[in-house]
Image (cartoon, rainbow, N blue to C red):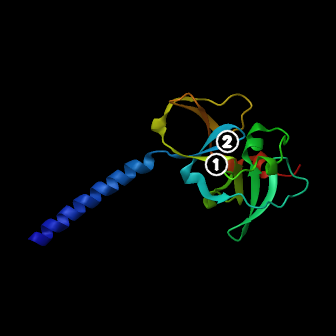
Amino acid sequence: MANRQSLKELQERLAQRLSAARSEAVTVSWLAVEAGGQRYLFPLVQSGEIFSWTGVRPVPYTKPWYLGVAALRGGLQGVVDLAQLVQGGARSVSPGERVTSESRLVSLHGALGVNAVLLIDRLLGLRQPAGFVRVDEPSAGTPSFVTRVLTDGEGRSWHEVDLQALAGDPEFLAIAA
């Protein structure tokens, strides 16, 4: 009889944990980064690994935001300067001048099917929806993969980047200059 009671309690605890896990999985959370003086949010489920800055081999005849390729974890990854890609301008500062000890390369999740990493200036941690007080549409001229602008309790703006939309964006996939 005691074994049945223990089994029933175990099943109840497992059911509660599964229910809690389902409700937590629905909560969106982001990797918060900074690039080119702007704050960005990457959905955690679309983000991959985070790497320290490594040597990048330039690729000729590519767009200014495409910095080249880097060997990471035994594979070649295209390195994209996030700030230049979003802002769409010519490279004003070479990445070598902007790279600091805080600079990182954030890969897109492998399921997105693109071997690319994004150069960011620094990591800012993780963010949850509860930390934001307002959601707005991005301004005109903003790339389509920047889906919304969130404002935190301190009045700072954060641009949400849909990495899946980025991976399918024709401009992102056409690196030739």
In the figure, 2 relative to 132: above or below? below
Residue at 72% x, 46% y is: 82
Place residue 36 in its image quadrant.
Answer: top right
As displayed, is residue 119 above or below residue 49? above
Residue 77 x %, y %: 74, 61
- Closest to the observer, 123 or 27: 123
- Do callouts 2 and 1 mark residues in contact (Cβ within 8 Å)? yes
Check disc 1 and report its element: helix, strand or loop.
Answer: helix
In the rendered image, residue 111, in percent from the top left (x then y), is placed at: 61, 60
Residue indicated by mark 1 = 163
The residue that appears at 80% across and 51% down in the rendered structure is 96
Residue at x-position 85% and y-position 48%: 63
Q: Secondary structure at mark 2?
A: loop
The residue most toward the front is 101
Label 2 amino acid?
Phe
Q: Is residue 59 above or below residue 26?
A: below
**Mark 1 crowdedness (10 Å alpha carbons): few <14, some 14-19, many ≥20:** many
Taking the view exactly as shown, the residue that stands out farthest to the left is 1
Residue underneath mark 2? 145
Q: How many marks?
A: 2
The residue type indicated by label 1 comes to Leu
In this rendering, would 75 be left or right of 175?
Answer: left
Q: Residue furthest right?
A: 61
Q: Considering only order in the chain, which callout, 1 or 2, is on the residue closer to the N terminus?
A: 2
Identify the mark at residue 17; answer none if there is no mark.
Answer: none
Residue count near mark 2 (Cα–Cα under 10 Å), binned few <14, some 14–19, many ≥20: some
Residue at 38% in and 48% down = 23
Q: Position of residue 78 (x, y in %)?
A: 76, 58
